[in-house]
Amino acid sequence: MTLESNLHLDGQIKGTVLSNHDVSVGHTGRFEGNIKAERLLVSGYVEGVVDCASLEIVAQGRVLGELHSDDFIIEPGGQFLGESRPRRQGPIAALSHQAEEEPPEEDVEAVEEAPEPKAASAPPPPEKAAAEAAAADQPQPEEGKAKEDKRERGETRHTVWGRR
């Protein structure tokens, strides 16, 4: 449906509405589909893709879907669930503290992760030491095989270090 005037919806529409004017969905209105308008005011329910210069969701209004709009207002009690983007996606301005700082250049290289050195600590209690010794005597064939399989598939751990 292509319109050359404003539209106020208190019933139900499924489909596409194209307008260069204002569209409002009343409290009892329900719209499902694609809508393109200059300004969209929702106090009912809208689901779909919305493209408008300004969207205002008032109390009890609900919008679900994808939104492309430059101005987006949700009053208390209004709900929006979906994804929103500006209509004219230009470059994103840097924050003032980001504009002053330039990110440091980093030399990055991949290094195979070495086992962490064990810190010196107090000896374990006698019961724990006996349990650890017994476990060490037991062969662990599955664990060793899994490590070998990972190495063969190239699944090794690497750490990336940066220099400043």
Image (cartoon, helix red, strand yellow):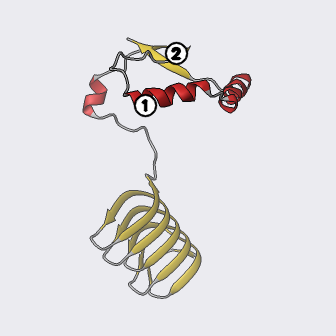
| Amino acid at pointer 2 | Ala
Tell me the residue that label 2 is attached to. 114
**Which residue is depicted at the point 38% across and 84% down?**
27
Instruction: Give the image location of residue 78, x and y in percent.
Output: 34, 72
- The mark tally for this picture is 2
| Amino acid at pointer 1 | Lys
Asked if residue 46 lies left or right of residue 92, the reply is: right
Marks 1 and 2 in Cβ contact (< 8 Å): no
User: Height in image: 117 above or below 85?
Assistant: above
- Depth order, front residue of 142/33: 142
**Which residue is depicted at the point 52% across and 25% down?**
133
Instruction: Give the image location of residue 111, x and y in percent.
Output: 54, 14
**Which residue is depicted at the point 32% across and 63% down?**
73
The answer to which image quadrant residue 24 occupies is: bottom left
Q: Secondary structure at mark 2?
A: loop
Tell me the residue that label 1 is attached to. 128
Q: Quadrant of the N terminus?
A: bottom right
- Within 10 Å of the Cα at label 2, are there few (<14), some (14-19), or many (20+) other Cα atoms? few
Q: Is residue 19 visible?
A: yes
The answer to which image quadrant residue 106 occupies is: top left
